[in-house]
Image (tube, rainbow, N blue to C red):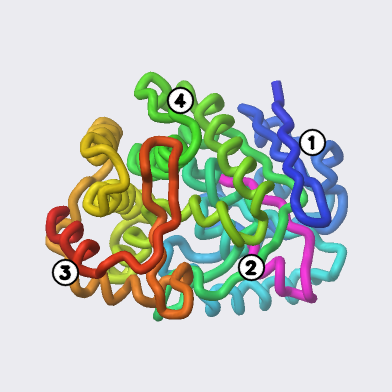
Amino acid sequence: MAERIPVIAPDTTYTIVLAPGLLASFDPAAEGLTGHVIIVTQPALADLYGAALAQRLPRAGLALMPDGEQHKSLATVHDLYTQFVQQGADRHTTIIALGGGVVGDTAGFAAATYMRGLRLVQIPTSLLAMVDSSVGGKVGVDLPEGKNLVGAFKQPERVLIDPDVLATLPPVEWRCGMAETLKHGLLADAALLNPALHHPQHAPELIRRAVQVKIDVVQADPYEQTIRAHLNLGHTFAHAIERVTEYGWRHGEAVAVGLLAAARLSQELGLCPATLAAEVEALLLATGLPCRLGGLDPAALLAAMRTDKKWQSGRNRFILLRGIGQPQIVEDVPETAVLHVLHVLQ
């Protein structure tokens, strides 16, 4: 049975539909998709789901983009614009982002900017995108100088989540999604840290709880003026890892090490109990996520952090923890403390 979760956003309200088997029984009229639609996806997902979805829609075409974080770029957006033109997109066209976080962010940015904005529907196909990036209206792409430096706020018309699609993903993608799920647990819902929930058979419950954390935060702070920054827990470290490795690390794996680094930095600064970092490490290990940097140069990672978009007027800002469910924004963290943490996690 479908669960419909309302999200109140600035100037609009949209619905998250969570339903196992949603794509197999897709009803275009029920989801308001009776007009011209362009499905943005990747080749493998086009074969698995995109072509069948297009056949269910009255007027739909496919626009393809390459796989991989390195293609979350302005060059890919330009190519999508060209495909939109070729397929006759106009201001009444709806863009469906069918894929993981890279597709959702890139297609979302293209939808936000083509003809000054087209309707957007997110259909996330990875656990990471389901619990995090498809909700909240932030879209964008990377620059060589940093991750997500070009972007916009673009609220979707719908977010359609079908947990059944997770069965086609390799186990590493489940683990990557678990990193963001654990982040939400550390921020606001300790039930998400319960290992009994950390299995694909519990995906609907896990997704529902994790999504609710995201909804609660983005409704309270849609434009990241205050507490929405909490959702960046671990991400300052993670984005630096991705940049230094030229996106050789998956985002979720980088977030996992970033969560542990944030916990250790919290401990280093005397903000949290000494046991917190050990608890976080145990959760990551039990989930099969990495806990070490594997020899990445701490100085290079620190340099990469300096172009993080969360910095303000050149002052560093980290999301740290006083405990589970107690995030805090901390500015002007001594670089010596950050470097110490990076050395410890080698």
Q: Which residue is mark 1?
A: 27
Q: Say which of marks 1 and 3 sits in front.
A: 3
Q: Residue at x 53, y 58 (%)?
A: 42
> Rounded to the nearest whole Å, what is the CA distance between mark 4 and mark 2?
33 Å
Q: Residues within 10 Å of mark 1 (few under 14, many from 20)?
A: some
Q: Residue at x 42, y 42 (%)?
A: 183
**Which labelled disc corresponds to residue 297?**
3
Q: Position of residue 58 (x, y in %)?
A: 84, 49
Q: Which residue is mark 2?
A: 109
Q: Tell me, yes or no, whether the two marked residues, 4 and 2, touch with CB atoms within 8 Å.
A: no
Q: Residue at x 23, y 46 (%)?
A: 290
Q: Which residue is mark 4?
A: 191
- What secondary structure is found at the residue carrying circle 4? helix
Query: What is the quadrant of residue 120 in the picture?
Result: bottom right
Can residue 169 be seen in the rendering of this structure? Answer: no
Q: Which is nearer the N-term, disc 4 or disc 2?
A: 2
Q: Residues within 10 Å of mark 3 (few under 14, many from 20)?
A: some
Residue 159 against residue 201 in the figure, above or below: below
Q: Residues within 10 Å of mark 4 (few under 14, many from 20)?
A: some
Q: Is residue 135 left or right of residue 178?
A: right
Q: Tell me, yes or no, whether the two marked residues, 3 and 2, touch with CB atoms within 8 Å.
A: no
